[in-house]
Amino acid sequence: MKEELEKLKAEIKLTLKEVKDTKSLEECRIKWLGKKGAITGILKNLGKMAPEEKPAFGKLANEVKEHIEKALGEKLEALKQEETRLKFAEEKLDVTLPGKKINLGRLHPLTTTLNQIKEIFIGLGFEFAEGPEVESDYYNFEALNIPADHPSREMWDSFFISDNLLLRSHTTPVQIRVLEKRTPPLRVIASGRCYRRDAVDATHSWMFNQFEGFMVDRDVTFGGLKGVLMAFAREMFGQERRAKFIPSYFPFTEPSAEVAIDCFVCAGKGCRLCKGSGWIEILGCGMIHPRILQRVNYDTEKYTGFAFGMGPERIAMLKYGIDDIRLFFENDIRFLKQF
Amino acid sequence: MKVPLGWLRDYIDIDITAEELADKLQSGGIPVEGIENRNEAGIKGVVVGQIVTLEKHPNADKLVVADVNVGNGKIQIVTGAMNVRQGDKVPVALTGSSLAGGVRIKKSNLRGLPSEGMMCSANELDLNIKDLPQEHREGVMVFPEDSPIGADVLKLLALDEPVLVIESFANRPDLLSISGIAAEAAAVLGKKLKKPSLVFPETDEAAGDIVKVEVIDKDLCPRYAARIIKDMVIKPSPLWMQGRLQAAGIRTISNVVDITNYVMLETGQPLHAFDYDLLKRGKIIVRRAKEGEKIITIDGEERSLTSSMLVIADAKKPVALAGVMGGIDTEISDSTGRILLESANFNGANIRRTSQALGIKSESSRRFEKGLDYYSVDIASDRASAMMVELGGKACKGRVEDGVQAPAPVNIALRANRTNSILGTEISVEDMAHYLEKLSFQVKVQGDILNVTVPSYRQDIKEEIDLVEEVARLYGYDNIPYTFPEGGGVVGRTTAVDKIESLCRDILARAGLYEVFTFTMASQESFEKVPFAAQNWLSVKNPLVEDQRILRGSLLYHLVEVASRNFRVKNFDVKIFELAKIYFPAEGFPEERRILSTALSGAGVDFYYAKGVMEAFFNELGIKYKFIPYEYPFFHPGQSAKILVNNEECGCSGRLNPVSAEKLDIEREIFLSEIYLDKIISLIPRKVYSSIPKFPSVERDIAMIVDEEIPASDIDEAIKNAGPEFLVKFECFDVYKGEQITPGKKSMAYSLAFQSMERTLTDEEVNIARKKICEALESKFGAKIRE
């Protein structure tokens, strides 16, 4: 009996060496440990044994059984590892191959820029308003101190639809529309498409966008205008920006100014972007001309206001380093995908 | 306006560099665009020389040998120039000088004779050819006889001076003059303004005996002044004057015309010189033109006039378009004996209308249309006469004038307090007075009030706020402190519609589309290629080009154009959208509607892809929609759908009609959709959470064979009606035609999902529900259910 167990042990060692997969291993387990297996067979003989031999033999039999179980377990583990290894090898990929194309959509850089400007001013307490793109001569010109035959009309060479209607040449008419309908305090912004009969080149387009804002209240001052625009300029172009207010002329504001910031590329030293001047003009502004407020029945002794306007195309061109305004409207995918 | 620095120096002492001056003017409110250097070529060493002798070269037919007096001696020059004669004064580049194009002049030997310099052409001096009189454009320049021998040509022609380029404001005609800019410079630099003398000798003969001036339409011509100058020999003007005019970008013509231009640039007051002897009966009549009256202007064009245009006429016919352009018949020529010098004031708006109607823009009309000073009429008239007398003319006594009384000076009360409260400053009354006085305003202070008298040339100053600006810019905008307006409880926000627009853009971007911006207008022809429904197109009366004529009623054409343009550069994967306005004629203001359009093309894109994008869009907004077959002319008739929301047309979707595609040279399929945003904005529901089911869903399929013609939407409808309320979802996931299916039939497979919020459904009740649906399909469509 003892010899049989020892023989079995030796056989197991040899057999397991040859086992190559989990299926054969299972067969071995049944052969050795199953109900009809070798150990069971051997233990059946236990009854025939002398009582004094029984404990020693039983112990040995158990040892052999444990040995088999352990050997089987170890083998199973080894086989599983091998199988996993083979599977992994099979599933190996060239991770340097390109990924699947995921097409993300995106907003146009002008929308992104407009949103950015809008958010800054909303943060400063301004509310958004809209007006029509086809405007009357009154709102586009007359109400803004630009009477017919005034030489300043030349600043806005417009597309006319009839004698009285035209495609708005700026968003400033929104100012009048809001002033007519509402009462102070007013902090309003507006934006949208505008049209001028300009010959198209790298910096001119006959259709373009404008962003406009104004404030009317008691005690609105030129100093306040400077404060608001400085806050905008820093938020948009960097907190370290400096600004310069240069006298200018618009029929609808007085005093009027152009705002230039120190170049954010060269910090004012002079580079290609600022054409060597160190300064970049970003917007026009001024105190709303009292005659405009009077025309819409505001008491100008009580209320004053400021207004400003800028070109989102110009702002986007500066921000992204775009050198041709036409790119915005050509919509080449290779352009659009960069923003 | 180009301002040669030397010319400005006639009016004001400048002891800073051109750059410093530009900076100071700029921050004081004068927009300096830049500084021109007229000697970028680095020319030097060119003097005026006079040809003393001129002989043929003994060894060459095409060369001549000249002895030239260059002031400090004579030099010999061998030249090929054939336009020079003995006695001519010419620019001479001496040995060691530099010319345009980096040419250096050295002593040389030409066919055996030494040459010690070169006679120069305009090109070699880098002059702007178009500003030169014809005879100076080619060959060696021949200078006027009075040019000083040995003088530095660079200095004479003002080529060594920087030129300030100053932008003009529509309200500041005074800045279109050297004297006006000098007045500003004097204010910002704190210098005194120098004024040229207007004193000159007159003859005993009175101009009034020679010419009669009658202004009939005084509303359009408040003032007209004529002077008569005799004995003026018409010839080129002196070099210094030519130099300044050329620096200012004005073509030099002859002494008389040059003087009128010179004085215009200097004073801002345009002048005109007539050949007096060509005026009929020595008469000047200023009147409105007769309807259809004609005049040939000095540019050679015949102009047909209307009764709203003002002309200067003699006894018979118009001789000039007032303030715009002179007539050719009375132009100054070499044979002119007596000159009638016009200096007048015209109504700005009228000049502007005339110049626009006739399409003539002149230096004169540019100034008049902005409204000029009544008083500059005599200043300019006298200044020009003085210059003509200096050049040998004889001025007859007096100005012959007609017009209205001089306007009273403008007086404005400026409140110091008000000024400070607008600017947010604490400028003292004294400082304000000081600033205004620097700008030549007369100021009387009375407590807080400054009583200001405006100089007549400041036509832009009409009311208090105009003076506030003057104070502000002299104080310096940059010195006004930064403050921030009080809040006042105003909350920043945008509109509901704007938020929805943003949401729509975001949804489509999330669906993988690129946003585009296209032009609002196009040509009629373009819209005929992709015809949108609107019949009455709004159009622009004055487009620059045809592409800017029709206001669109659909974005489809433009999106197709974007796709096509991308195809041409091999961007074949085009998925784009645009949110914009479309326009329709209406009473009063045209109707503007918001529209959202998409165009899709590329691998894997078909009708159902495009529809999928639309479905995602509507689902995301929470709007129920329906696609029904509808043939739009711009879509493929078999792949064209109307989108209904609440049974109203809210959009369309389909494949670009291959006929349109062919017209546009497009070989790829493009799938287009449009959504009329205004119609659905009010339908977007508020988002409300619905609880996530706790009980499992049970899935079943139905496969059937039905007639090919039956649209899926009908079957959907039948399933919905026959299904129980716990039928939560169903969808057609396969359609098959072809082998094993009888022709005229199609196989369709639906997946159904049943789910209750209250309990777990039993197999039995689900099977019963499915059976009911199958029966409905059988009875309604004669469907053969495949189990």
Image: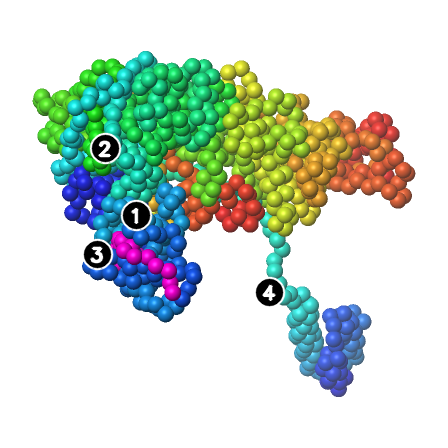
Q: CA distance from mark 4 to mark 3?
A: 82 Å
| Left or right: B480, with B704 as reference point | left
Give me the C-alpha separation between circle 2 and circle 4.
91 Å
The chain letter for the residue carrying disc 3 is: B
Quadrant of residue B233 within the rendered picture: top left
- Image marks 3 and 1: residues in contact by CB distance under 8 Å: no
**Residue beneath label 2, please?**
B393
| Residue bearing the label numbered 4 | A96
The residue pinned by badge 3 equals B71
- Report the residue at 46% width, 24% height from top: B303
Q: Nearer the viewer, residue B683 or B313?
A: B313
Pointers 2 and 3 in contact (CB under 8 A)? no
Are both tags, 1 and 2, on one chain?
yes
Q: Amino acid at mark 3?
A: Gly
Cα distance, mark 2 to mark 3?
Answer: 29 Å
Question: What amino acid type should be assigned to the residue bearing mark 4?
Answer: Thr
Q: Main secondary structure of the magenta part?
A: strand
| Residue B691 seen in this snapshot | no
User: Whole-Å distance between the Cαs marked 3 and 1?
Assistant: 15 Å
The residue that appears at 10% across and 23% down in the rendered structure is B444
Q: Which mark is residue B143?
A: 1
| Magenta-tinted stretch | B43-58
Q: Does B369 appear above or below B289?
A: below
Question: What is the chain letter for disc 4?
Answer: A
* Disc 4, SS: loop
